[in-house]
Image: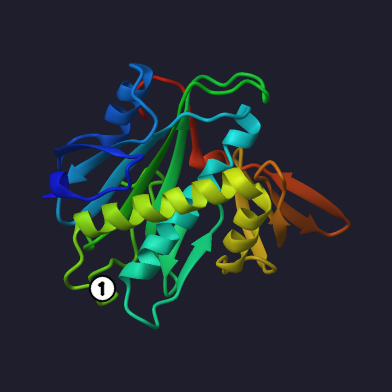
Amino acid sequence: MIAESRLPPLFRLTALPGDADIAAEARRMAEAGAEPGTVVCAERADEFRCAVILHPDRGAAEARLALYVGVLGLGDALGATTPPGIDVTFLWPNRLEANGGALAEIHLFEPEAGDAETVPSWLILYATVAIELGDHDWRSGVFPETSLREEGCAEVSVTDLLERFTRHLLTWINRWRDDGFDPVRAMWLRHSRSHGSDVAVDADGTRYFGTFKGIDDDGAMVLEETGFTRRIKPRAALEVGSGPPS
């Protein structure tokens, strides 16, 4: 039972039934003034669905870098869960893979967008992990290509993932707060299988082709094309507005 999970002291858990819309409920709670560190998680065996409410202390442009912090926290949790030899890698901006197969995603929700310097009243990190293969309701519309069971994690539970995710997320939040974005970016790129490679990126209905050179200070992908450099923001992983998710 996830209600018995042991989380770091910062976090307070709200456990919901497996069919609950975790993202929508977390957003409702954030709008109602839920405290930072509120965690909303579904009680189900086939998929990990977890939302964490944050109260940023910096402007929106910098606060959105929490997306990369969330990916690192979930990546470390998966690394601690999967057997030795399983390669957990990242696909820009928010997908996590095991041996090249789509396994998990992180999305970031925020209130109605203001200017870049305005501090958002809340942010939500929403994580999904396929424990078993099936018709998972991933926000990107991409179906998982593998699962923790497929990768040899026969005994893993939602409670295991919840405890590991919150612990590693807190570690990376503290690192980001104390040392800035540089170590977050460096570790994210270290685990990216596309960094330094030729990639195709969809943005605003347009597909861009180039070489993935890095991540800029505002979280944009730096894509080098023939003769010039393009910056592409991770819009597909960000959801703005206080209404129910689409």
Disc 1 packing (10 Å; few <14; some 14–19; many ≥20): some
Is 53 left or right of 130, judged from the image as shown?
right
Residue at (28% x, 48% y) in the render: 7
Spot the residue most to the top: 32
Percent x, y of residue 245: 36, 29
Residue at (24% x, 73% y) in the render: 153
Percent x, y of residue 78: 36, 64
Q: Is residue 135 visible?
A: no
Q: Which residue is mark 1?
A: 150
Asked if 111 appears above or below 15 in the picture, the reply is above
Question: Which quadrant of the rendered structure holds the C terminus?
Answer: top left
Amino acid identity at mark 1: Glu
Spot the residue most to the right: 227
Asked if 70 appears above or below 199 in the picture, the reply is above
Q: Nearer the viewer, residue 214 or 73?
A: 73
Percent x, y of residue 44: 15, 50
Is 69 left or right of 102, judged from the image as shown?
right
SS at mark 1 in the image: loop
Residue at (79% x, 57% y) in the render: 225
Residue at (37% x, 35% y) in the render: 37
**Quarter of the figure with residue 53:** top left
Q: Nearer the viewer, residue 157 or 222?
A: 157
